[in-house]
Image (tube, coloured by chain):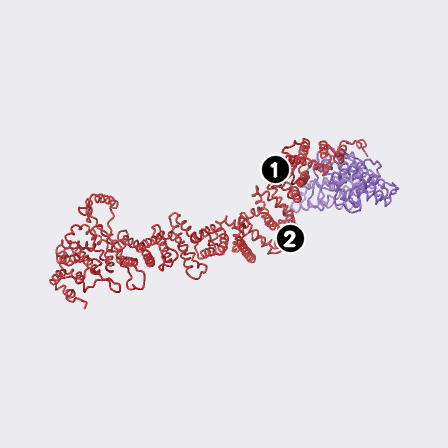
Chain colours: A purple, B red
């Protein structure tokens, strides 16, 4: 292997027909990347091989190809990638190949194939591949656009197109907890998130069901990604995984304000609180960031302003009473207060606490919240 | 790795299935498709990520099945035998069908867009790939039949429709978009799919197709670009297919779209709506330009769509449209060319323009109003110009079709209504009518009939003249040319229509209007101000309808007003022409109609009190003059009718005649019957008739006669007019040699013969000679009858006087004079000398009658002087003396000198007379008179000298 130069490798591989050349190329790429000290030259060669022989994005002269792979070719490619990743037992090598296949400048271009690969991996299911995917998400950021896109595509496959496969997915947290945790974080950012969107979208009911079930039955799931240290190729900096706790809490807290009264939200909320309670206290705390925990704040305030606007012409009687009468708002605030109380009691929140409390004090009147705040001030 | 046990649980079946599918579909050269399909379907259920590949594989499966089908059909065509179906294909396809349908029905929202896109794309590919094989594609229907008999394509169509139907209410956009895109890509082989899918969901497909088309249309910046857009063509194609069975749906959809574009933009509407609303009308125009069915759908009932209010609303878009089409001219051009292509609603479109031009009561700014007006005017003008040139070009290419003209023809009734509205509209409409008339004169005639019948103003008639004299109208065309031109037929139809109306006031009004209009037209024609009318079309038309027109004249059904109008018209026509140069001979029937009409009208005038009757008299005279000079038959008819009516009809009272009390009106018939029966048995004159002038036996004495309540002046006036009219009927043609004589002696002879015929009830003893007085006993009954007529009918005296004036015609009335004289002799003989004291009335009337008869005879020169002066003598004489004179001087003279024209001479100037110097009666007839006068010399002395002494002589 070492004897052959880059062009030679390319030429020898080019003699093969398509699916076969990809099969050979991926092996070659593995060898190139998983060298103890991969040279820049090797990396370049590996990337070239990927672009030309695996994903068929460029032809042998380096020009962009006009026609993309047919679906059947694509499926064969998936099979090859799957086979290769599944049979690579060295975690570091696997992660290294995976990351080089799907990150960098080509990440968006190949997201379609990535989505399908992961979808297949879930369907089979293939823990190794999923674990690599989890690492990939973590490295690119599990709330990044790439991760969100992957999550969206998976939801479309399993929760929208074939909803009857949902029961099968109940095992996913057991098969690939890290992946599930990162997946959840990505999902939590897809819904109830009205930034840059004309209207708030809600999760499909079967997705919500599955998530509730996952969280309820696996109290350690939410912090699973933080629990294991990923085996990264040498020179890579491990990225901190964001837990889905704050994102999902955002769902349960905001849901009443959007008239989402499914009891699933209550259950999910309970599951989340239980999950928080399970977190082992560590210093410094890293499970929940104040910034993430403040996600519902803006929405509640906005809702409150809208609500008050409706009564601006009305008589100024008993503003507090009216506030107390708004069941939705109170439920939302209650849940918020519960979450804060539980999280603070476990001491798993990090960030600018002072600012955090200042912001919270701006929220509308709520008894529980009031108590929580006061307790905290006393503790201080 | 918290749960290693679970992690190791693999589900090899999924992986295996995947691998076996890949192995079969990609690597195997001869795969078992049945098994492979099963695996693929399984994968579809368990591994959603593989769906693209699975569907791709199904493409090959369907392709194969289709290919097999095509080969089978081709074999059948070649050999005549249809090979059996491959069961595998059937089974595989039905399996795929059921699974996919299941997917779609369970989870339509997610699967329908994917599946429908796939199936449409596949259908498109298959249609293109096998186009032209196994069949020659001539029409969409045939192609549709072929593909529907193929299992695989039918299944695909089925799947597609299911996708659409399950998804039709939420998000059809994607499905229809796919349909359109595929249609663009695979046109025209794909048309059958569109046709089929479209007819499954007409409303949705039409609406969506339109909105997709509009969206695509908005992307185009200019007209040229829009024309080229393949999507637009595909939209047109699809709508074209659907038009056959869903025309109404298309229309509704188009209307909805249009109305939507008018709605103001709501606050919540997406931003692109603004652009779309602006583009809607250009889009519709473009569609209409490309497809005639859409044009029909749009133009049908367009007046409901485009009210003035809507037009005003549209104004705010105009600038954008102009920008789109490049320039206002281009926009106008396309509008005009579209209008010309309209097969329906042409009239409505014209009407909209007209309404726009005469826009008044619309609550918009004046500026906008005037803009609309100017624009509408311009377009209308250009449109008419365009049609004009097309019509002219049509004469070179007779098969060329001008759609809008057909539309006009179909909606000609609406056109007709506009014809009689205001001037502007009428002008436009008359132009259109001339366009129609170029190739369809019958329609033109119909419209003109309507126009002429309803014309109430000069403007209307102006339009009519415009149409009739337009150069576009081929005047030499059969059969119009033969029948006196178009207007002749129009006139004919108008008259026929009027005749068919139920008799009431409106009918009369219609007639009045027709006559009035005709007269106006004739006046125009006669004046030189209308060069267009120099060809005398009106006159000719009247001429061709003269029988109908004259038939009206004198009819009892119409009032005097109509007759006055008719008289004015007919008089104006100056028929028959006296100069004899006219190229149009007047039919005899018309002459006779006119004659008898004139006579009837005369009596109508007499019974009228209005001053207008004098106009009538004048016209009657004019007409009669022309008629009698033209035709002898007319003359005889006129004379006979005049006399008969004046003497014996109810009209006789107009001239002072007494009528019998008609108390026993109903008995008359019976009596006549009786009388006829008696007459048939024997000669009535020799026997006593039961009918005496004193009354009917059994009925008592005849009731006294009643005189009418007309004043003497009126009677005198009427008599005067009657005589004048009569004289008119006797006129001579004016020639150089008879300037002094204006009356034809022949005609007057006819008058006197007619008098005899009417007055004398007998055919015998009507000759000129006076018999022996004794013979009067035979004719006494008749004589009294005649006498009574004279008593009751003062007009008879006037007539006798009239006749007497024109010698020698009185001769022919000899019998009447004889009868009166005989009765007078009898009467004078039977009364005593004291009667003038006892019964002065009777005496006076006898004396009066005697004077009158002697007067007439003297006037007619039947009694030469001195006998002609007896009338002056008798008032001073006794009854017995009167009898003597009547007997010896009058009767005997007349008996011996037969009153015949032979007694008269004609002098050099043409005057007929009896020279009194040469025709002095012999002594024997004057002696009695002289002796009696001598006996009464103290009273008649002054006359005696005059009569017997100062006798004029030739010397």
Residue A327 visible here? no
* Residue at image point 86% right, 45% down: A41
Dot 2 lies on which element?
Answer: loop
List the single residue furthest toward the bottom.
Answer: B955
Q: Which callout, 2 or 1, points at the residue further toward the start of the chain?
A: 1
Q: CA distance from mark 2 to mark 1?
A: 40 Å
- Mark 2 or 1, closer to the camera: 1
Rendered view: B22 above or below B568: above
Q: Residue B425: x and y, percent?
A: 49, 55
Q: Residue B240: x and y, percent?
A: 59, 44
Q: Quadrant of the C terminus of chain B?
A: bottom left
Dot 1 lies on which element?
Answer: helix
Q: Which mark is residue B222?
A: 2
- For label 1, the residue is B145
Instruction: Pick the residue in front: B37 or A220.
Output: B37
Residue B609 visible here? yes
């Amino acid at each position: 292997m070492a004897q052959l130069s880059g062009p030679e490798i390319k030429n020898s591989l080019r003699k093969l027909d398509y699916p076969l050349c990809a099969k050979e190329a991926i092996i070659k790429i593995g060898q190139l990347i998983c060298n103890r000290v991969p040279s820049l030259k090797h990396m370049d060669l590996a990337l070239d091989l990927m672009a030309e022989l695996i994903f068929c994005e460029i032809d042998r002269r380096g020009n962009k190809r006009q026609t993309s792979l047919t679906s059947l070719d694509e499926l064969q490619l998936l099979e090859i990638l799957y086979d290769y990743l599944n049979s690579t037992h060295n975690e570091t090598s696997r992660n290294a190949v995976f990351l080089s296949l799907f990150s960098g400048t080509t990440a968006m271009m190949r997201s379609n194939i990535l989505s399908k690969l992961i979808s297949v991996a879930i369907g089979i299911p293939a823990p190794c591949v999923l674990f690599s995917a989890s690492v990939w998400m973590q490295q690119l950021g599990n709330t990044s656009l790439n991760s969100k896109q992957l999550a969206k595509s998976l939801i479309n496959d399993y929760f929208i197109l074939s909803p009857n496969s949902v029961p099968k997915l109940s095992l996913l947290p057991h098969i690939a907890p890290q992946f599930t945790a990162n997946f959840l974080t990505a999902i939590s950012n897809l819904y109830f998130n009205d930034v840059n969107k004309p209207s708030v979208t809600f999760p499909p009911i079967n997705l919500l069901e599955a998530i509730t079930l996952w969280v309820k039955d696996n109290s350690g799931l939410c912090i699973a990604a933080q629990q294991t240290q990923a085996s990264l190729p040498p020179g890579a900096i491990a990225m901190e995984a964001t837990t889905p706790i704050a994102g999902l809490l955002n769902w349960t807290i905001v849901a009443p304000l959007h008239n989402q009264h499914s009891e699933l939200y209550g259950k999910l909320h309970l599951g989340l609180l239980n999950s928080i309670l399970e977190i082992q206290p560590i210093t410094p705390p890293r499970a929940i960031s104040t910034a993430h925990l403040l996600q519902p704040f803006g929405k509640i305030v906005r809702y409150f302003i809208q609500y008050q606007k409706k009564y601006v012409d009305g008589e100024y009687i008993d503003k507090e009473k009216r506030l107390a009468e708004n069941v939705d708002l109170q439920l939302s605030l209650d849940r918020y207060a519960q979450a804060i109380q539980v999280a603070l009691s476990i001491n798993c929140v990090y960030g600018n606490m002072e600012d955090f409390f200042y912001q919270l004090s701006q929220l509308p009147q709520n008894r529980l919240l009031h108590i929580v705040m006061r307790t905290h001030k006393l503790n201080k | 790795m918290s749960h290693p046990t679970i992690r190791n649980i693999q589900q090899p079946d999924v992986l295996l299935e995947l691998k076996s599918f890949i192995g079969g579909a990609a690597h195997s050269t001869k795969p078992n498709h049945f098994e492979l399909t099963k695996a693929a379907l399984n994968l579809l259920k368990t591994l959603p990520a593989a769906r693209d590949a699975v569907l791709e594989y199904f493409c090959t499966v369907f392709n194969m099945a289709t290919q097999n089908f095509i080969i089978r059909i081709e074999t059948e065509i070649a050999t005549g035998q249809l090979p059996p179906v491959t069961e595998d294909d059937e089974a595989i396809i039905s399996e795929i069908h059921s699974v996919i349908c299941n997917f779609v029905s369970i989870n339509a929202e997610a699967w329908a867009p994917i599946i429908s896109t796939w199936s449409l794309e596949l259908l498109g590919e298959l249609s293109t790939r096998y186009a032209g094989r196994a069949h020659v594609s001539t029409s969409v229907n045939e192609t549709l039949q072929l593909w529907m008999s193929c299992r695989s394509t039918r299944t695909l169509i089925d799947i597609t429709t299911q996708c659409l139907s399950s998804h039709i209410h939420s998000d059809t956009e994607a499905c229809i978009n796919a349909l359109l895109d595929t249609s663009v890509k695979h046109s025209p082989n794909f048309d059958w799919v569109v046709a089929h899918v479209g007819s499954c969901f007409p409303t949705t497909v039409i609406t969506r197709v339109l909105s997709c088309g509009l969206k695509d249309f908005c992307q185009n910046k200019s007209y040229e670009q829009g024309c080229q857009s393949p999507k637009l063509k595909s939209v047109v194609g699809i709508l074209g297919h659907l038009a056959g069975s869903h025309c109404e749906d298309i229309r509704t959809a188009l209307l909805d779209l249009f109305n939507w574009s008018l709605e103001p933009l709501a606050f919540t509407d997406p931003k692109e709506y603004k652009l779309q609303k602006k583009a809607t009308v250009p889009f519709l125009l473009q569609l209409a330009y490309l497809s005639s069915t859409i044009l029909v759908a749009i133009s049908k009932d367009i007046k409901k769509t485009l009210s003035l209010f809507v037009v005003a609303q549209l104004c705010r878009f105009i600038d954008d449209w102009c920008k789109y089409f490049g320039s206002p001219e281009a926009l106008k051009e396309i509008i005009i060319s579209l209008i010309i292509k309209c097969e329906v609603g042409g009239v409505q479109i014209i009407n909209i323009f007209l309404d726009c031009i005469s826009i008044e009561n619309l609550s918009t700014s004046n500026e906008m109003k005037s803009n609309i007006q100017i624009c509408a005017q311009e377009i209308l003008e250009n449109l008419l110009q365009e049609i004009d040139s097309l019509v002219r070009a049509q004469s070179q290419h007779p098969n060329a079709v001008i759609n809008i003209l057909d539309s006009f023809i179909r909606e000609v009734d609406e056109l007709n209504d506009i014809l009689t509205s205001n001037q502007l509209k009428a002008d436009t409409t008359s132009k259109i009518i001339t366009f129609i008339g170029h190739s369809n004169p019958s329609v033109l005639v119909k419209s003109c009939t309507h126009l002429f019948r309803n014309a109430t103003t000069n403007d209307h008639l102006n339009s009519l003249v415009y149409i009739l004299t337009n150069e576009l109208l081929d005047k030499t065309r059969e059969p119009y040319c033969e029948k006196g031109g178009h207007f002749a037929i129009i006139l004919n139809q108008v008259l026929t229509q009027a005749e068919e109306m139920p008799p009431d006031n409106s009918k009369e009004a219609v007639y009045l209007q027709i006559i009035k209009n005709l007269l106006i037209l004739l006046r125009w024609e006669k004046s030189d101000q209308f060069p267009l009318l120099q060809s005398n079309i009106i006159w000719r038309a009247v001429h061709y309808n003269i029988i109908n027109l004259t038939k009206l004249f004198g009819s009892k059904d119409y009032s005097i007003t109509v007759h006055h109008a008719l008289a004015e018209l007919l008089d104006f026509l100056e028929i028959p022409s006296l100069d004899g140069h006219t190229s149009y001979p007047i039919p005899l029937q018309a002459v006779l109609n006119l004659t008898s009409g004139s006579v009837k009208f005369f009596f109508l005038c007499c019974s009228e009190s209005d001053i207008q009757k004098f106009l009538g008299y004048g016209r009657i005279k004019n007409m009669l003059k022309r008629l009698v000079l033209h035709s002898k038959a007319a003359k005889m008819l006129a004379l006979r009718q005049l006399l008969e009516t004046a003497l014996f009809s109810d009209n006789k009272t107009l001239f002072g005649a007494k009528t019998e009390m008609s108390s026993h009106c109903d008995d008359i018939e019976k009596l006549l019957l009786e009388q006829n029966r008696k007459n048939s048995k024997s000669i009535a004159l020799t026997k006593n008739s039961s009918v005496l002038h004193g009354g009917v036996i059994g009925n008592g004495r005849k009731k006294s006669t009643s005189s009418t309540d007309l004043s003497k002046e009126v009677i005198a006036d009427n008599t005067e007019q009657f005589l004048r009219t009569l004289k008119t009927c006797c006129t001579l043609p004016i020639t150089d040699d008879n300037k002094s004589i204006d009356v034809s002696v022949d005609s007057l002879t006819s008058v006197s013969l007619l008098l005899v015929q009417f007055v004398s009830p007998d055919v015998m003893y009507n000759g000129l000679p006076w018999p022996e007085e004794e013979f009067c006993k035979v004719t006494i009954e008749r004589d009294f009858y005649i006498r009574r007529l004279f008593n009751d009918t003062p007009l008879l005296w006037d007539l006798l006087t009239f006749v007497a004036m024109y010698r020698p015609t009185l001769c022919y009335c000899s019998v009447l004079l004889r009868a009166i004289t005989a009765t007078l002799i009898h009467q004078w003989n039977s009364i005593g000398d004291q009667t003038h004291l006892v019964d002065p009335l009777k005496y006076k009337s006898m004396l009066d009658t005697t004077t009158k008869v002697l007067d007439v005879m003297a006037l007619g020169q039947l009694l030469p002087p001195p006998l002609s002066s007896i009338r002056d003598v008798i008032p001073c004489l006794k009854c017995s003396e009167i009898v003597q004179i009547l007997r010896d001087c009058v009767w005997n003279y007349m008996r011996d000198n037969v009153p015949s024209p032979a007694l008269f001479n004609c002098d050099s100037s043409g005057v007929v007379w009896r020279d009194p110097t040469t025709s002095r009666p012999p002594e024997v007839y004057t002696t009695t008179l002289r002796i009696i006068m001598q006996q009464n010399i103290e009273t008649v002395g002054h006359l005696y000298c005059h009569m017997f002494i100062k006798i004029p002589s030739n010397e």
